[in-house]
């Protein structure tokens, strides 16, 4: 039993005890959170990325529409694909940016759910430990951010992967300060991250398998594809029947279908500043189903037999809708 289990909504004392168990057990095993879903066996959540700008750049408008959709779909949780706080993450646990860009923005009733967040490259320019710390969840109990972890629901396993350390160029970036504490030595960190993902996916018997990272594998946006992830991460996703890879980083909304596997590449990075306009047309794939370089977010609805994704703009209009189904044998 490589992982330890605990409910997402737990007390800080429990967290402390479990943190100790985690420490004793191993550094390499990512934490695993069990999320109980609605009684009807369905699961729904929103995905948002690249957002924390104190409400500016339409962040507030996106938040308002997220609230409406969240209530309509009765979502179970929200996923943040990273770049949570611009420009340089958080300075510390008491940085007012946390409340100004998160608590005071996502105020809608429907969004008072657990948020599962990973770090983006901008978050690495600040105090990384602050975002990961259980004490920041005392300020807003919805917040849960880890480097790499697994959210385990009845029908879907969602693996969160810390992709920033994979990207070579940040380690040769003289213009910005990155906080690599806990990441170095880098090769070991990457190897352990991949190993944990691979064994987690192999052990997963969930109907739907999803992986979340900050950086895109496939994208026609400003940043485009991430070569390191194509080389190191993608083979693992392909070998383990992953259904969705979800990311941010490119400030747009996009859906690309893989032509050689079932993987759907879903970018949701439109949480605030967008409209870069400069798309990389050489990265347009035959599998490109949808691309929008403005603000917005994505919803995912799952049952044992079906998955539906939708993308929305700042007015709440559905820009793209896509559905897939799997054979479903009920246990008689
Ligand atoms: C806000 O959204 C509207 C509608 O999509 C867009 O026209 C406008 O440029 C956006 N504003 C900013 C600051 O991005």
Image (cartoon, grey):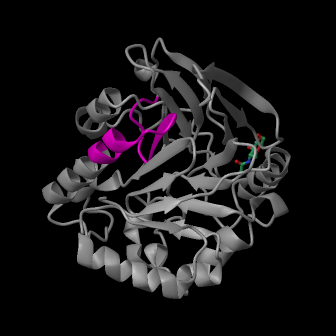
Q: Position of residue 87 (x, y in %)?
A: 50, 65
Q: Nearer the viewer, residue 132 or 228?
A: 132
* Quadrant of the displayed image that contains ligand 1: top right
Q: Position of residue 7 (x, y in %)?
A: 55, 67
Image quarter hosting the N terminus:
bottom left
Query: Is residue 24 placed above or below 157 in the rendered structure?
Result: below
Q: Is residue 13 left or right of residue 317?
A: left
Which residue: 57% across, 21% down?
Answer: 326
**Does residue 74 show up magenta in the picture?**
no
Image quarter hosting the C terminus:
top right
Q: Position of residue 88 (x, y in %)?
A: 46, 69
Query: Is residue 301 placed above or below 170 in the rendered structure?
Result: above
Does the image show residue 248?
no
Q: Nearer the viewer, residue 192 or 220?
A: 192
Q: Is residue 135 left or right of residue 43?
A: left
Q: Position of residue 178 (x, y in %)?
A: 31, 67
Segment colored magenta: 198-219
Which residue: 78% across, 31% down?
Answer: 318
Q: Is residue 150 left or right of residue 52?
A: left
Q: How many marks?
A: 0
Which residue: 39% across, 28% down?
Answer: 241
Which residue: 44% across, 19% down?
Answer: 258
Does the image show residue 28?
yes
């Amino acid at each position: 039993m490589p992982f330890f289990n605990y409910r997402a909504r737990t007390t800080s004392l429990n967290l402390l005890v479990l943190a100790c168990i985690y420490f004793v057990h191993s550094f390499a095993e990512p934490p695993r959170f069990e999320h109980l879903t609605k009684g009807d066996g369905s699961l729904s959540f929103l995905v948002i990325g690249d957002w924390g700008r104190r409400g500016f750049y339409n962040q507030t408008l996106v938040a308002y529409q997220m609230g409406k959709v969240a209530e309509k779909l009765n979502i179970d949780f929200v996923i943040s694909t990273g770049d949570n706080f611009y420009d340089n993450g958080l300075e510390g646990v008491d940085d007012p940016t946390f409340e100004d860009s998160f608590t005071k923005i996502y105020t809608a009733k429907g969004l008072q759910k657990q948020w599962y967040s990973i770090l983006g490259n901008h978050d690495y320019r600040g105090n990384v430990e602050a975002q990961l710390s259980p004490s920041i969840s005392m300020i807003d109990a919805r917040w849960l951010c880890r480097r790499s972890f697994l959210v385990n629901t009845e029908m879907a396993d969602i693996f969160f992967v810390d992709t920033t350390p994979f990207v070579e160029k940040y380690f040769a970036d003289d213009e910005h300060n990155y906080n690599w504490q806990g990441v170095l030595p880098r090769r070991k960190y990457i190897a352990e991250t991949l190993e944990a993902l691979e064994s987690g996916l192999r052990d997963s018997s969930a109907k739907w398998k999803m992986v979340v990272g900050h950086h895109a594998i496939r994208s026609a946006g400003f940043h485009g594809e991430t070569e390191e992830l194509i080389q190191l991460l993608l083979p693992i996703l392909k070998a383990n029947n992953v259904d969705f890879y979800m990311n941010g980083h490119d400030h747009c909304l996009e859906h690309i279908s893989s032509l050689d596997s079932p993987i759907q590449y879903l970018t949701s990075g439109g949480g605030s500043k967008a409209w870069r306009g400069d798309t990389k047309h050489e990265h347009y794939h035959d599998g490109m189903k949808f691309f929008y370089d403005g603000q917005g977010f994505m919803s995912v609805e799952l049952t044992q037999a079906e998955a539906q994704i939708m993308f929305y703009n700042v007015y709440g209009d559905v820009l793209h809708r896509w559905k897939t189904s799997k054979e479903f044998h009920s246990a008689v």
